[in-house]
Amino acid sequence: MGRSPCCDKVGIKKGPWTPEEDILLVSYVQEHGPGNWRLVPTNTGLQRCSKSCRLRWTNYLRPGIKRGNFTPHEEGMIIHLQALLGNKWAAIASYLPQRTDNDVKNYWNTHLKKKLKKFQPAMELPQMAQACLNKTLATGSSSTIATYASSTEIASPNICSNQSAIILQTQPKDESGGGDLMSNEHFESILWFENMNNVAWEKSTCGSTTSKGGFQDSGNDDQFSVEITQEMKQKTGNNSKFYPSFSSLEKWLLDDSCAGKVEEMNQWMELSPIF
DNA sequence: AATCAAGGCAACCGCAAACCA
DNA sequence: TTGGTTTGCGGTTGCCTTGAT
């Protein structure tokens, strides 16, 4: 299983792409479709390695890519999904079809990581956590209280499924040594954010995604409510807490109606003197 | 106006999984 | 089944832009 030698060849151009190169690449892909990247440099005359061509296409030239500022909803989704999945940028980007994994990764590294860095120490303050928890209890119904732990149990085997402690990977490895174990208090303090969106949890109207994300939308609000109720019955059999499935979380994540709520949180974060 | 530092982002690197003959 | 090739992905680098001095 050797490394691809394509980029080791002499005479291969590196660095920023010119508009001319872009045009060549786009017209080739339009004609032949994406894939078989090894043939692209030879067939187009581009002095680029196949890998570079593929990257240029997927990260920049591919149709439907949305550029520019991330919306509060997108921001919220990234924060949520990063907490759930860790640095699985491709997986996270699959929930944001218009964004590339590179975009998401860059946005996380340059914007969100800083935000959360400010956010996290503040959350370690017990009173802060309590305040958040109170907010949770004040705004959320018991049926909508969720934990990341239960969600991740379904979402990814790579993530700790222990309900009392999950791996929060918002800190880079070099700083935390591979993820922090989050305390119950800390974890619960996050929940208020979850519950700010409980309307969406209960009244999701979002569309379905493709198989990669992996949920099937009922397309019916009532049906979704029934889903939750049945799930509650099952889950609460052995446990007093209700943990919605990952598909429920996905429903929330993909619901644009949450944008306002996320913005609300962002505003709160901005306004808070702690941050 | 010039210089420097920090931030942002496109692109590259290298590993690993998937694919295929 | 095996080994070579291709593709996907995450981490990192380096250049360009912007803001501060």
Image (cartoon, coloured by chain):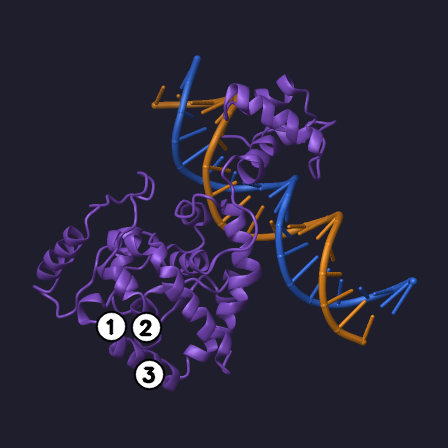
Chain colours: A purple, B blue, C orange
User: CB under 8 Å between callouts 2 and 1?
Assistant: yes
User: CB under 8 Å between callouts 3 and 1?
Assistant: no
> Which chain is indicated by disc 2?
A
Q: Position of residue A36 (x, y in %)?
A: 51, 22
Is label 2 in a helix, a strand or a loop? helix
Of A241 and A183, which appears nearest the observer? A241
Of A72 and B4, which appears nearest the observer? A72
Q: Is residue A191 above or below residue A244?
A: below
> Which chain is indicated by disc 3?
A
Quadrant of the rendered image containing residue A268: bottom left
Task: Kindly identify which residue carries mark 3.
Answer: A130
Q: Earlier in the sequence, mark 3 or mark 2?
A: 3
Asked whether the residues under marks 2 and 1 belong to the same chain, the reply is: yes
The three-letter code of the residue at mark 3 reads Gln
Q: Is residue A243 above or below residue A133?
A: above
Task: Kindly identify which residue carries mark 2.
Answer: A192
Q: How busy is the neighbourhood of tag 3: few (under 14 within 10 Å), some, or many (20 plus)?
A: some
User: CB under 8 Å between callouts 3 and 2?
Assistant: no
Q: Is residue C9 left or right of residue A54?
A: left
Q: CA distance from mark 3 to mark 2?
A: 10 Å
Task: Kindly identify which residue carries mark 1.
Answer: A140
The three-letter code of the residue at mark 2 reads Trp
Q: How busy is the neighbourhood of tag 2: few (under 14 within 10 Å), some, or many (20 plus)?
A: many
Q: CA distance from mark 3 to mark 1?
A: 15 Å
Please tell me which residue is depicted at 54% across the width and 49% down the height of the picture: A103
Q: Position of residue A212 (x, y in %)?
A: 34, 40
